[in-house]
Every structure is written in C-alpha cells, then in structure tokens.
Image: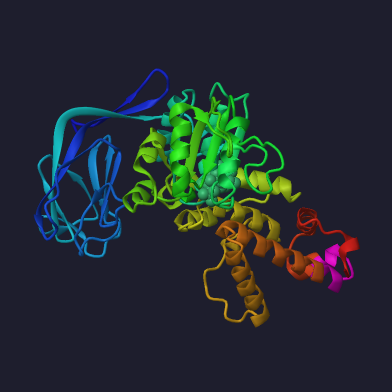
Amino acid sequence: MSDTTRTVFLDSGEQLLELQKYQLRVVGGEGEHAQAHVFEARKVQIGSSPENDLVLDDPAVSRFHAVIEVDERGYLLRDTGSKNGTFVGKLGVREIYLSDGCVFRVGNTEVNFTITEVPAEVHFSNKTHFGKMLGGSLVMREMFSMLERVAPTDATVLIEGESGTGKELVAEALHAHSARKDGPFIVIDCSAIARDLIESELFGHIKGAFTGATGTRQGAFEAADGGTLFLDELGELDRDLQPKLLRALEKREIKPVGSNTTIKTNVRVVAATNRRLIHEVKEGNFREDLYFRLAVIKVEMPPLRERPEDIPVLVEHFLGAANEMAGRDGVDVSYKTMEKLKRHRWPGNVRELKNFVERAVLLTHGDQIETRFLQSREPVDEKPPVVLESAASMAGLALEQGLPFKDAKNRLIEEFEKSYWMRLLEQSDGNVSEAARIAGVHRKSVEYILKKLDISRDDLGS
Ligand SMILES: Nc1ncnc2c1ncn2[C@@H]1O[C@H](COP(=O)(O)OP(=O)(O)OP(=O)(O)O)[C@@H](O)[C@H]1O
C-alpha cells in the first residue's frame, strides 16, 4: 500500500522497518501556529499534555489525543479516545492512513502532514526476551533491538517509565550483557535515602566528615568500580547534589564527603525515573546539563496497557513461577480469562500483573485463575472502621517518616497479612487445614504464606 515504508528481514533475523521522516506543522485553528516538527520515530504522540511528542496548546485537544504509528502499510493516524475527536475533512476518524500533504484536525487545531525525502530506519529484534524481560510486541522488540546494541557499550542510559514497567530489569539486563558483567551491579534508590545521607551514599566519606562519621566509608561509585551503578528514582535527587553527579559522570572522578582528594572511578551509570525528566528540567527541578549527560541513550518503557499482546506470555511465565512457589501443580488460565486480562488497564503495570497471578494461584480452589482476584477498585464502605483507622494512622506515620509510597503500602499490606493469619490460626487452634478452609485458600498456599511471613506455631497467642 505504501511506497514510503517497507519491512525488510535481515540475515541476522532482525526485522527492519524502512520509512521516510515526516513533518507535522500546525496550519490552522485556535492554537498558535507551531513550528514544523520532523519525526522519524515509529510512534508519535499528539496532545495537550507536555508529555506528548507534538504538544498542542488548544483547550479542545485532549491530554493524549492521537498517535501516528508507522508500519509497513504507511503512516497510521489513530485517535486515542479524545473528547472532541480527530477529523480529516468533515469526517471523524478513529484510524486512517495519512497521505503526503494531507491536513487533519485534532480539537480545533489543523495539522499538515508531509513526508520528507530523508530516509530513516527502525529495527526490531528477532528475540522476544532480553535478560529476564519478556515481550513479543513490536514496541518491546524495538526496545530489545536498541538494548542489544547499547548494552555492550559504556554509554550512560536513562530509563523512563511508569512504576512496575520493568525499569530495574532493563538496568540488570544492560549490566548482564556488557563486558562489565563480572563486575559489581550496585543499586541506589535516590528516593529511599535521607537527603543528608545521599551524598555520602554515592561518594563515600572520610572519618570525621560529619557527626557520626566515625570511620572512612566507601560510596556507591567506588563500590561499583569496574561494574554498573543503577541510580533508581533519579528524579528525586536533590538539586544541590546534581552538579556533583554531573562531575562524577564527566570527569569520572569523585570526591568523598570531607575529603580534598579526588578518586578516579570506572563506572557505567544507568539511571531510572518514573517522571518525565525533561519536565523537571522545564520546571527548574533538574539541571539541564545533567539531563543531557544522562540521556545519551534514553529508553522509554511502554505501559502494559499499550501492549496487551504481551500479556499472554507474561501470564504464562508468572503462572509457572507461582505454581512452583505455592506448591501447586498446573493452575492454568482459560481463554476467556486471558481475554479479560488483556482488556484490563493495569495501572501498576507488569508488577500488578505478576502480583495478581501469584494471588490468584494462591487463592483459587480450582485449576484455573479467575479475574475476581483482580484487586477491586470499588469503594469498600463496609470495612470495619478500625481497619480504616489503622490504615490512616499508618499513612500518617509513613508521611512523617518520609517513607516512599511503595514501601509504605507494602508495609501496610504485610502488617495486615501477618495479623490476619495469626488471628485466623489462633481461632483455628493452629490447624492449618481449618484455617485454609475458612480463608478460602488452598492448604499448601497457607503453608507458603506462613513461611513467607515468618509465622510459626510458636508465635500463636503471643
Ligand atoms: N517485561 C517483563 N518480563 C518479565 N517480568 C517483568 C517485566 N517487566 C517487569 N517485570 C517484573 O515486574 C516487577 C516490576 O519490575 P521492575 O521492578 O523492574 O519495575 P520498575 O519499573 O523498576 O518499577 P518501580 O518504578 O516501581 O521501581 C518485577 O517483579 C519484574 O521482574
């Protein structure tokens, strides 16, 4: 259909999409006429939110209004559920292949689409995994292809994506596929370390550098020497520390807190954030020079809801592990359930899917997981007030202690699980089969839960 895009299969097994770069230019409507933007990405997002590739300042444009996706048939414009619709001429369209020179309208803004003479290429790996990361969708295979090329280099990589999309897995896989694989892989979660300790965590300190510094201590940069340093939640890094990180990256040397001497380092840095860091740059929270130094290679993790075709392979994988963990044999998934799972929004991404499968295997009486074990978003107004009260007080405590949301939530869930199972076992006089019957959970699962929560019969009654 298209003479400007085509797919080629390479001898290496890789798939190559050849296209021509294209230009989008606002030519009419309410919004100020933007300058022309040239794109070569396989997918370009259009909307009013600054997170889009083409940002339109028009109140009639939805936050995420439409996308252009390139495939071997051409340049597909797709409305992504906008409020005011996408039009070509007078026709409202959900999906349409654009032709060179055509004009489409989003909200009240008219955009001209032009194909340029400049060729571009998008590569797709022939593999459906990279390290421990699974995925056969085009967007994942495009990412794997990029990671395969980037991993063996020493390039700094910035990984952006929603929570639970697999950013840490990417960092691990980059390390495992590099010449540094036998060196250390050190993780620092910038959101989990108190503000006044993070400099020392990163760069170390010498004895007497501050109250409590009773000895000299090595920081993460030194610990990661010859290996990879993964800076998680980098968007949380204090502005005061950013110049020091920039210096460490540029000069490949660090200065421990309290010391006047610099130490040479040989570290590859991979950073991750669930914020759009370029936003933080625009807001003045993140230094531009550091951003560009980190984003030499940028990996954007697609949310799970945008790649439902990956769900079956992930479910199968998590089912295998969950069966083993729960001592079950062959708990499976029906076609109908799988279809429902593909339609779910998965706000917690792959982590939520994994937790769901684990929970469903533990809780099912039968041989198949069911979607009723998806965590309900309905308001639970019949909960005893005491539960809500203790949840509220834990939330208060977590905020006071500056605990990150994830840690606070996990702590609350763990406390709930522990007291639930302790009480239930007490009630059933330590009889695991009886407890399993009351809880509606397989006996083997109870044994696993008790082991996981470190509860023994001796704990009962304490
Ligand atoms: N593509 C994938 N294949 C297999 N497992 C995955 C994949 N993506 C994520 N997971 C699993 O989902 C969970 C969450 O992944 P991970 O911790 O890497 O996410 P993240 O983006 O770093 O999350 P956060 O921002 O909350 O730290 C992990 O258990 C991970 O193993």
Instruction: Note whether residue 313 is visible.
Output: no
Which corner quadrant of the image does residue 202 belong to? top right
- Between 116 and 158, the one lying in front of the other is 158
Q: Quadrant of ligand 1?
A: top right
- Is residue 410 part of the magenta span, yes or no? no
Image coordinates for residue 443, horizontal then vertical, percent: 80, 59
Magenta segment:
424-435
Instruction: Note whether residue 283 is visible.
Output: yes
- Between 277 and 431, the one lying in front of the other is 277
**On the picture, is 425 further left or further right than 308?**
right
| Magenta region, main secondary structure | helix
> Does 175 sit above or below residue 60?
above
Which corner quadrant of the image does residue 289 belong to? top left
**On the picture, is 181 further left or further right than 167?**
right
Query: Which image quarter is the C terminus in?
Result: bottom right
Query: Which image quarter is the N terminus in?
Result: top left
Image coordinates for residue 203, horizontal then vertical, percent: 57, 37
- Between 78 and 189, the one lying in front of the other is 189
Image coordinates for residue 194, horizontal then vertical, percent: 58, 52
Q: Which residue sits at x=66%, y=61%?
A: 411
Residue at the top extreme?
11
